[in-house]
Amino acid sequence: MMKGGFGGMNMQALMKQAQAMQAKMEEDKRKLEESVVSAKSGGDMVEVTMNGKYELQSIKINPTAVDPDDVEMLEDLVMAAVNDANAQIKKLEEQYAPKMPTNLGGMF
């Protein structure tokens, strides 16, 4: 018969480990949400700032990028900067994503 029922790990130790993992996940989520990234396009013609919740914080457009005869170019620059900021947040999410522990104390 196995001692403690979980490969020798008692329930109290297992609960403590689970609580520590939960606290780490909550801290990582907070860090991600407080993160801010900036992305530029068109040689700094457009700059966007976004937080870890995918909320745009600011958009800056260089006045020389505003050409009434070529609105599509400006739209493309804004879209490129926003997409870059989204990609940066996605990388941060992967960095903060919870990782499965390699050693669960003999639970399995």
Image (cartoon, helix red, strand yellow):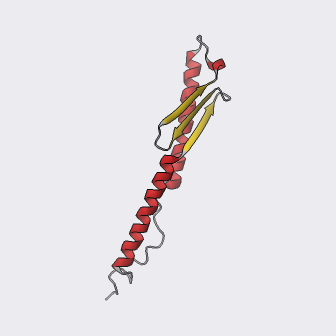
Q: Nearer the viewer, residue 26 or 6?
A: 26
Picture coordinates of residue 29, whole percent (x, y): 46, 53
Q: How many marks?
A: 0
Residue 108, can we see it? Answer: no
Most extreme residue toward the bottom, as rendered?
1
Q: Residue at x 54, y 22 (%)?
A: 75
Q: Nearer the viewer, residue 52 or 98?
A: 52
- The answer to whether residue 97 is left or right of residue 61 is left
Quarter of the picture holding the N terminus: bottom left
Q: Residue at x 34, y 87 (%)?
A: 3
**Splitting the image into 4 quarters, where does residue 19 fall?**
bottom left
Residue 106, can we see it? Answer: yes
Tell me if residue 45 comes above or below residue 2 in the rendering: above
Most extreme residue toward the top, as rendered?
69
Q: Residue at x 66, y 29 (%)?
A: 44
Q: Nearer the viewer, residue 36 or 103?
A: 36
Q: Residue at x 53, y 35 (%)?
A: 83
Most extreme residue toward the right, as rendered?
43
Picture coordinates of residue 80, whole percent (x, y): 57, 31
- The answer to whether residue 42 is left or right of residue 18 is right
Picture coordinates of residue 107, whole percent (x, y): 38, 76
Quarter of the picture holding the C terminus: bottom left
Picture coordinates of residue 30, whole percent (x, y): 47, 52
